[in-house]
Image (spheres, rainbow, N blue to C red):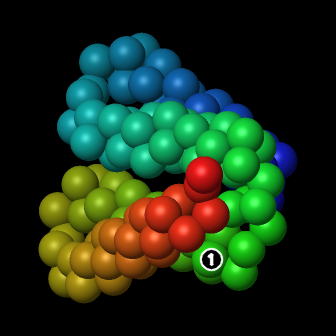
């Protein structure tokens, strides 16, 4: 799982950097929250999860790690994609999808916590 987390972290890094560049070029910073979340929850958090799972392979080989990976990587695009659309269109009718994505990330974080306490020395 470590390699999966690190590879997808690199994808989020590029997405976050490209969004930041686009905002800078256009001088439109309305998507700053999306940019920050892609960098923090995408790049930084996933890279740290990958490093932890690399350093503690027993934790990375669990079903908890797999479920955590999928919850985070379905929840984050759902949360940030719908937030991006809401900011772009001022249509808040899809806020429930942002909330669902957020909850998925929180559940994944709780599973990560449980996994660390169970499998990290």
Position of 48 relative to 75 (above/below) = above
Instruction: Identify whether 11 is placed above or below 23.
Output: below
Q: Quadrant of the N terminus?
A: bottom right
- Disc 1 is placed on an element classified as helix
Residue 15: x %, y % from top left: 58, 38
Residue pointed to by mark 1:
64
Q: Looking at the image, which residue is at 34% across and 36% down?
A: 36
Q: Is residue 72 visible?
A: no
State whether residue 61 appears in this view: yes
Spot occupied by residue 99 in the image (x, y as percentages of width and height): 26, 77
Q: Residues within 10 Å of mark 1 (few under 14, many from 20)?
A: some
Front residue of this view, candidates 91 and 110: 110
Residue 13 picture location, percent across and down: 59, 33
Name the foreground residue: 76 vs 4.
Answer: 4
Horizontal side of residue 3 vs 50, given as left or right = right
Q: Is residue 56 above or below residue 100?
A: above
Residue displayed at 73% across by 74% down? 62
On the image, the x and y values in percent for residue 55 come to 73, 40
Q: Is residue 81 above or below residue 70?
A: above
Say which residue appears at 46% left-offset and 71% top-offset.
Answer: 114
The one of 43 and 26 positioned closer to us in this rendering: 43
**Residue 109 located left or right of residue 16:** left
In this view of the protein, which residue sits in the foreground, 65 or 92? 65
The structure residue drawn at horizontal position 37% and vertical position 25%, both measured from the top left corner, is 23
Q: Quadrant of residue 25?
A: top left
Q: Is residue 34 left or right of residue 64?
A: left
């Amino acid at each position: 799982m470590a390699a999966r987390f690190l590879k997808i972290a690199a994808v989020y890094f590029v997405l976050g950097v490209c969004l930041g560049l686009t905002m800078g070029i256009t001088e439109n910073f309305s998507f700053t929250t999306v940019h920050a979340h892609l960098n923090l929850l995408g790049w930084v958090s996933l890279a740290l999860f990958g490093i932890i799972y690399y350093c503690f392979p027993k934790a990375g080989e669990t079903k908890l790690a797999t479920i955590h990976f999928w919850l985070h990587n379905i929840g984050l695009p759902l949360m940030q994609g719908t937030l991006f659309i809401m900011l772009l269109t001022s249509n808040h009718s899809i806020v429930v999808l942002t909330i669902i994505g957020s909850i998925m990330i929180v559940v994944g974080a709780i599973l990560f916590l449980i996994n660390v306490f169970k499998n990290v020395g």
